[in-house]
Amino acid sequence: MTGYYRTELTLALLLILQGSVRSDELKPPATAATVHTELRSALQSAPLTMLFNGSTPRDFAAWQHSFRQQLNELLGDSAPPPVWSTREVSRKVFSDHTRLELILHADNLFSLPVYVLLPMNDDSAGRFPAVLAVHGHGEFGADAVVGREDRTGIEKAIAAANYDYGLQFVRRGYVVVAPHLIPFGPRVDRSGYGGNDPCAVTFVRMQALGLLPITSNLRDLRWCLSLLEQRPEVDPTRMGCAGLSYGGRMTMLVAAVDSRVRIAAVSGALNLMQERFSGRHSCGSQMIPGLLNYGDYSEIGSLIAPRPCIWETGSEDSLIVAGWDERFRDRLQQAYRAAGAEDQLLYDRFAGGHRWNGEVAFTAFDRVLRP
């Protein structure tokens, strides 16, 4: 029985017990509700049985352990491969950094194309801090993040969203790894989808194999952290993650699951699954089946505590819905407060649209990763 019919039946029984209406006066609706209406009702009344309601560090630690365990069960195995091979596709030296293009291979996994950006200047500690820079939706994948201005049409995308934050990080003295996620960049041929959304098609196809796009992408991000750990230029104790839009969603997720991320910056992704999937289209790459039985993206974000996290939102970002964003912030606030880390929950509310800002994030990353 769907949530819609459970709600209708509960209301009917309540009216009968109160004497407000006789049972023979209740009539079924003249027409059946559409599946869209029923699903929207079910989504908006989802149980969310594991929302955090505590107030002490002990309360938070117990909840965090339980919810992370539940999240990992929903996602399935996201562990990076212990062994892999690397093939260098290209290398280009610029005045302020070197850009490597690599493909990672491991048995029984999809191959992973990534960029690695290496700064030119010396780091005083001998090895550099590192940032995992995650792209969002769009035709360019990680090309925009690393500033591949040789790609036709990419300049407009970079200018509109301040999208080359990977390039900005390497110029600040960070080693950067920027992967192409599924199904974006060279990992998708959009002409073969007949105008359909590659995220939706990929979700269905992977489900037929018992796989999830979001879990595969999470594994790839954790694989990138392992790659950074093995790079001789990198101090593996000083790694952060940053991303815009879907990149923000995946930054949130990898930081929640993998403690090697010391600090995270989530841009343009302060929205709840409950709102996204009940009110409008949202892609299959963001879907975690069964999540709303237990919590929402806000609970995943809360798993990052007590580590610092910056949440960027533009004043004109149409993807951030008033009311729902405050619900998200309230849940984060309660978790960080209980963890004794309220000062590690940072917001950058800037004037602008759906774009990377960096004003708070760059300063916070330098404070944490370049002490």
Image: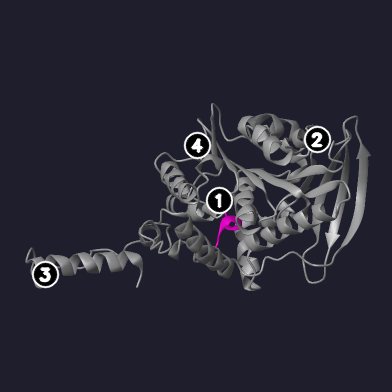
In the image, taking residue 317 as reference, residue 260 lies left or right, namely: right
Question: Is label 4 in a helix, a strand or a loop?
Answer: loop
In the image, taking residue 8 as reference, residue 163 lies left or right, namely: right
Could you tell me how far apart the alpha carbons at marks 1 and 2 are, in whole angstroms? 26 Å
Choose mark 3 or mark 1, whichever is in front.
1
User: Percent position (x, y) of residue 276?
Assistant: 48, 50
Residue interval drawn in magenta: 283-289
Determine which of the numbered discs, if any, sits on residue 215 in the image. Answer: none
Q: Which of 226 and 56 is in front in this view?
A: 56
User: Percent position (x, y) of residue 128?
Assistant: 82, 42
| Residue 196 visible in rendering | no
Question: Is label 2 in a helix, a strand or a loop?
Answer: loop
Q: What residue type is labelled 4?
A: Ser
- The answer to which of marks 4 and 3 sits earlier in the sequence is 3
Determine which of the numbered discs, if any, sits on residue 318 in the image. Answer: 4
The 10 Å Cα crowd at callout 4, few under 14, some 14 to 19, many 20 or more, is few
Which residue is the site of mark 1? 305
Residue 98 quadrant: top right
Which residue is the site of mark 3? 17
Q: What residue type is labelled 1?
A: Ala
In the image, taking residue 64 as reference, residue 367 lies left or right, namely: right
Q: Which of 75 and 207 is in front in this view?
A: 75
Could you tell me how far apart the alpha carbons at marks 2 and 3 are, in whole angstroms? 69 Å
